[in-house]
């Protein structure tokens, strides 16, 4: 049997060459970074996929074809959680199209959001999301950016009790509304929370990440690259030599492995429209993660650039 490292190299070579065979699961699973959802004990891959902006391509044939290959690459490399929202233009429709083309691959963890101040409209949004994705049941529905979160959580709890939904959660983004999110985490029973966390935006380390761990709430990290701003700022510099110790080969893996190394983080959801970038992102699923000392090195290194 091949060593894990050789198998990793084989898959990256296949992906780089444009191999497109649909795989229900990755070529290997034992070496993959996964995390446990505290409320259930279920394990999911630690790198997921966001769809904000990147999957909003409507009915454009070339855009749909490219996103299908992006999603194929995601599943081939071991991905599971796909995150979207009614707020993201045509993204849910595009995700549904791609999933249908790929035959709804095994391992899909479907996560969307409800985003409206009106309770009845929230129920309508959710039903439309089912139709757009082509799914009878979502794994996770989140209240997007805390909009009418009390009303919408009532709806989600009723769906969960009826077996129409597996997990519920709330989201924030851009590092905003942390005080309100902290109050909700302390008060409400949730399965997931989604927030912004990356090498430069580390405010969540102070209260929210420890509180989520204390409360047994899974954490999805959005904006792991600051919408590409981290690459704009740092990609012209070389990686530090010691990054090889954790099998980091590019800046995407550097940024993502820092996030995954926090013990409270369950899944990071970078978004991309390109197959080569998806391949880079998914490389963070494999190999060792930095320990506390290297995490400090990573923070110090980017601060020095």
Image (spheres, rainbow, N blue to C red):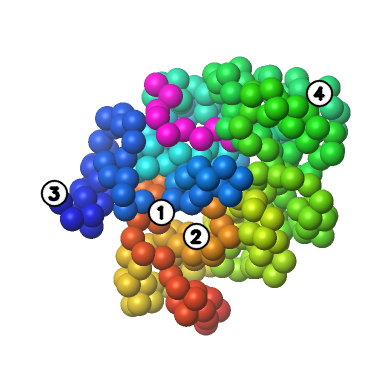
Q: Is residue 58 visible?
A: no
Q: Earlier in the sequence, mark 1 or mark 2?
A: 1
Q: Earlier in the sequence, mark 3 or mark 2?
A: 3
Nearer the observer, disc 4 or disc 1? 1
Report which quarter residue 73 is drawn in. top left
CA gap, disc 1 and disc 2: 9 Å
Mark 3–mark 2 Cα distance, whole angstroms, equals 28 Å
Q: Residues within 10 Å of mark 4 (few under 14, many from 20)?
A: some
Q: What count of labels does the image hold? A: 4
**Mark in front: 3 vs 2:** 3
Q: Is residue 53 left or right of residue 49?
A: right
Secondary structure found at label 1: loop
Residue that appears at 78% across and 47% down: 188
Depth order, front residue of 53/257? 257
Look at mark 1 in the image and give the residue it sits on: 33
Callout 2 secondary element: helix
Q: In the rendered image, is residue 8 in sight?
A: yes
Residue closer to the observer: 205 or 117? 205
Compare marks 1 and 3 and give the one earlier in the sequence.
3
Q: Nearer the viewer, mark 2 or mark 4?
A: 2
In the rendered structure, which segment of residues is drawn in magenta?
103-111
Q: Which mark is residue 260?
A: 2
Q: Residue at x 32, y 53 (%)?
A: 31
Tell me if residue 220 comes above or below residue 207 in the rendering: above
Q: Which mark is residue 1?
A: 3
Residue that numbered label 4 is attached to: 121
- Looking at the image, tell me whether mark 3 or mark 4 is earlier in sequence order: 3
Instruction: Tell me what residue is drawn at x 40 percent, y 30 percent.
Output: 106
Q: Which of the two discs, 2 and 4, labels the residue nearer the N terminus?
A: 4
């Amino acid at each position: 049997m091949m060593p894990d490292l050789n198998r990793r190299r084989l898959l990256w070579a296949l992906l780089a060459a444009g191999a497109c065979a649909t795989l229900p699961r990755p070529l290997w699973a034992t070496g993959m970074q996964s995390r446990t959802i505290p409320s259930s004990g279920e394990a999911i891959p630690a790198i997921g996929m966001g769809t904000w902006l990147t999957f909003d391509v409507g009915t454009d044939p070339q855009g749909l074809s490219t996103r299908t290959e992006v999603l194929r690459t995601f599943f081939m490399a071991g991905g599971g959680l796909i995150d979207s929202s009614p707020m993201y233009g045509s993204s849910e429709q595009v995700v549904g199209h791609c999933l249908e083309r790929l035959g709804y691959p095994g391992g899909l963890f479907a996560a969307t959001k409800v985003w409206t101040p009106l309770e009845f409209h929230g129920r309508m949004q959710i039903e439309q999301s089912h139709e757009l994705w082509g799914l009878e049941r979502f794994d996770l529905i989140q209240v997007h950016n805390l909009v009418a979160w009390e009303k919408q959580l009532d709806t989600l709890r009723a769906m969960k009790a009826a077996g129409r939904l597996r997990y519920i959660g709330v989201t924030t983004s851009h590092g905003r509304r942390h005080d309100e999110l902290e109050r909700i985490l302390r008060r409400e029973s949730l399965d997931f929370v989604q927030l912004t966390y990356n090498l430069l935006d580390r405010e969540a380390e102070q209260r929210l990440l420890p509180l989520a761990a204390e409360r047994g709430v899974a954490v999805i990290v959005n904006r792991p690259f600051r919408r590409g701003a981290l690459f704009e700022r740092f990609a012209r510099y070389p990686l530090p030599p010691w990054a090889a110790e954790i099998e980091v080969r590019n800046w995407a893996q550097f940024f993502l492995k820092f996030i995954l190394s926090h013990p409270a983080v369950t899944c990071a959801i970078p978004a991309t429209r390109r197959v080569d970038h998806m391949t880079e992102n998914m490389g963070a699923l494999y190999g060792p993660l930095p320990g506390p000392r290297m995490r400090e090195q990573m923070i110090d290194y980017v601060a020095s650039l």
